[in-house]
Image (spheres, rainbow, N blue to C red):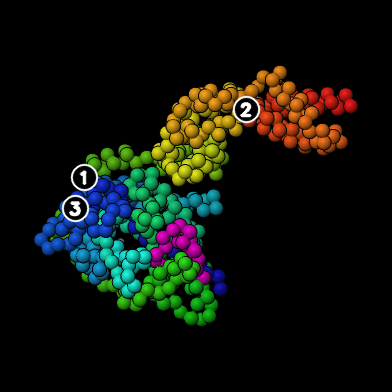
């Protein structure tokens, strides 16, 4: 039997606000345990939560960017459950009338666009963290850090429109891209600011009915998500093939052992006893404010990618890499405004700049490289004042110190040598110094010419103009051939 995979994701994204959703405690990551707490987020009796306006703003932006409808009145609810990292004994979340409903995001699968529906986007607070696995925690004990209590989250519930683990991966990547372009979440999966659970079922191809689904949790990387889903889909297929049934249950992905394991049954079937939060008024979204926020939604990666292809004639793959971060994309466009050669800007950014950023684990905005400096550098290459190799070699200094490229070139004597009489002597010396290679060349091994070019570049510390060197080399080799 052929099976079809039916997957839906639920994504929690931490919003990048300075303070928590219902109190003024800091949301900064990495502080000493239990140092960013107050009576409100600790769940003390008699305190009242006050909604952070910025949280609503960010959630509305996400709703706008994903084509959602907005509730006229949106409510908070208490989701009751008992856990040591949840001091109030309930999480303030949204249940009925969430802020955003019925949106979609577009993914690209095998070159084709596909819309993945969103059921809802709602606001909620995060819980604290139980710590069992750190070295300093004694065997059998658990510590609780409540700093994360009350950190604002949006929960994005996707429709079961995904048909493979690969599509799930692309969907999450698309959501991450949008959250980052909007500057509303750090989306750091390792630090837990982007978390993802999946509902997985399979059904015979052609069937409209949904199979029994399982929920897979704890996939804390993109790679983990895809592997976990592949594992779970295969597990379900092999159960059905053996004539067994699939049990509805919650599973935990264990990345170390590369498998899913059932969670204890006690935690499987929650009855959360949702009821309206009596301490918070409904959110009434002001239309003019919503309209204002709509003006702030930037062009998103998908459109930007297509525009770069048509406007700058970039290869779609190159365009995709450039737009993978909003900062890189903006940097590219700002540079092209000055150095009007999109291809050379794109090549240099994709090759050299991104490699440098990867090596130094920096973002482009954190370096001292500016579009103006990069344009200056590429101008020097275009005018033949420096070789491309020299341009590459000065990039780290540009990025670290912001020194104008012309100054670095002059200080270090890196100007490209295009002077024929100067280079001619060096070419001659190189040929004289390698009689064996010269012999092979005259026997017809013409690829040896590349070796000579390399030797000239070495002798000039990369400063020789390769075009001129090639011409001179051709000339001199021909002369020698004629002479011999
Ligand atoms: Zn607090
Ligand atoms: Mn949730």
Where is mark 3, residue-wise? Answer: 23
The residue that appears at 28% across and 50% down in the rendered structure is 28
Q: Which residue is drawn at 70% across and 23% down?
A: 423
Which secondary structure lies at badge 3?
loop
Q: Position of residue 49 (x, y in %)?
A: 16, 55
Residue extending farthest left = 46
- In the rendered structure, the answer to whether residue 481 lies left or right of residue 48 reads right
Category of crowding for the residue at label 3, using alpha-carbon neighbours closer than 10 angstroms: few (below 14), some (14–19), many (at least 20): some
Q: What stretch is highlighted in magenta?
A: 216-234
Q: Is-magenta flag for residue 339?
A: no
- Which is more N-terminal, label 1 or label 2? 1
Which of the numbered marks, if any, corresponds to residue 74? none
| Residue 32 horizontal side relative to residue 182, left or right | left
> What number is the disc on residue 286?
1
Q: In which quarter of the image is the N terminus?
A: bottom right
- Relative to 456, residue 250 above or below: below
Q: Is residue 331 visible?
A: no
Majority secondary structure of the magenta segment?
helix
In terms of secondary structure, where does tag 2 sit? loop
Q: Nearer the viewer, mark 3 or mark 1?
A: 3
The quarter holding residue 327 reads: top left
Disc 3 Cβ-to-ligand 1 distance below 8 Å: yes
Judge from the rendering whether residue 436 lies leftward or rightward of residue 121; answer left or right: right
Q: Please identify the quadrant where the C terminus is shown.
A: top right
**Residue 332 percent across, percent down from the top left:** 47, 35
Q: Position of residue 116 (x, y in %)?
A: 42, 55
Ligand 1 shows up in the quarter that is: bottom left
Please give the name of the residue rendered at 65% of the width and 22% of the height, measured from the top-left corner. Answer: 418
Which residue in the protein does label 2 denote? 463
* Residue 383 or residue 432, whichever sits in front: 432
- Residue 101 placement: quadrant: bottom left
Q: Distance between the residues labelled 2 and 3?
A: 61 Å
């Amino acid at each position: 039997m052929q099976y079809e995979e039916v997957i839906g994701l639920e994504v929690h994204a931490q919003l990048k606000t300075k303070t928590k959703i219902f109190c003024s405690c800091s949301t900064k990551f990495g502080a000493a345990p239990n140092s960013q707490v107050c009576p409100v987020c600790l769940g003390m009796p008699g305190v009242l939560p006050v909604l952070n306006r910025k949280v609503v703003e960010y959630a509305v932006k996400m709703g706008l960017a994903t084509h959602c409808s907005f509730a006229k009145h949106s409510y908070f609810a208490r989701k009751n459950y008992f856990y040591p990292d949840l001091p109030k004994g309930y999480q303030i979340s949204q249940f009925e009338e969430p802020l955003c409903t019925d949106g979609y995001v577009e993914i690209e699968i095998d070159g084709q666009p596909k819309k993945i529906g969103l059921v809802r986007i709602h606001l909620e607070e995060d819980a604290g963290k139980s710590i069992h696995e750190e070295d300093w925690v004694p065997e059998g004990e658990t510590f609780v850090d409540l700093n994360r209590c009350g950190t604002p989250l949006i929960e994005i519930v996707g429709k079961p429109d995904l048909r493979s683990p690969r599509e799930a991966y692309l969907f999450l990547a698309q959501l991450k891209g949008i959250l980052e372009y909007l500057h509303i979440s750090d989306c750091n999966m390792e630090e837990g600011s982007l978390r993802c659970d999946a509902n997985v079922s399979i059904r015979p191809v052609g069937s409209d009915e949904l199979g029994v689904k399982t929920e897979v949790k704890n996939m804390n990387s993109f790679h983990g998500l895809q592997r976990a889903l592949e594992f779970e889909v295969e597990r379900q297929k092999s159960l059905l093939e053996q004539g067994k049934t699939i049990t509805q249950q919650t599973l935990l992905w264990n990345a170390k052992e590369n498998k899913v394991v059932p969670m204890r049954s006690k935690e499987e079937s929650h009855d959360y006893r949702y009821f309206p939060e009596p301490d918070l008024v409904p959110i009434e979204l002001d239309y003019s404010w919503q309209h204002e926020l709509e003006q702030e939604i930037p062009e998103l990666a998908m459109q930007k990618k297509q525009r770069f292809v048509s406007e700058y004639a970039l290869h779609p793959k190159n365009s995709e890499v450039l737009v993978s971060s909003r900062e890189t994309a903006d940097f590219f466009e700002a540079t092209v405004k000055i150095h009007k050669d999109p291809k050379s800007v794109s090549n240099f950014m994709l090759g050299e700049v991104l490699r440098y950023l990867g090596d130094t684990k920096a973002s482009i905005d954190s370096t001292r490289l500016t579009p103006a400096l990069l344009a200056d550098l590429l101008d020097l290459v275009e005018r033949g004042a420096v070789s491309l190799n020299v341009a590459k070699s000065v990039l780290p200094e540009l990025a670290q110190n912001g020194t104008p490229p012309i100054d670095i070139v002059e200080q270090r004597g890196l100007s490209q040598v295009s002077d024929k009489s100067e280079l001619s002597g060096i070419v001659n010396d190189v040929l004289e110094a390698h009689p064996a290679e010269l012999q092979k060349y005259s026997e017809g091994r013409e690829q040896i010419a590349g070796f000579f070019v390399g030797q000239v570049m070495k002798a000039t510390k990369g400063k020789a103009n390769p075009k001129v060197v090639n011409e001179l080399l051709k000339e001199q080799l021909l002369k020698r051939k004629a002479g011999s």
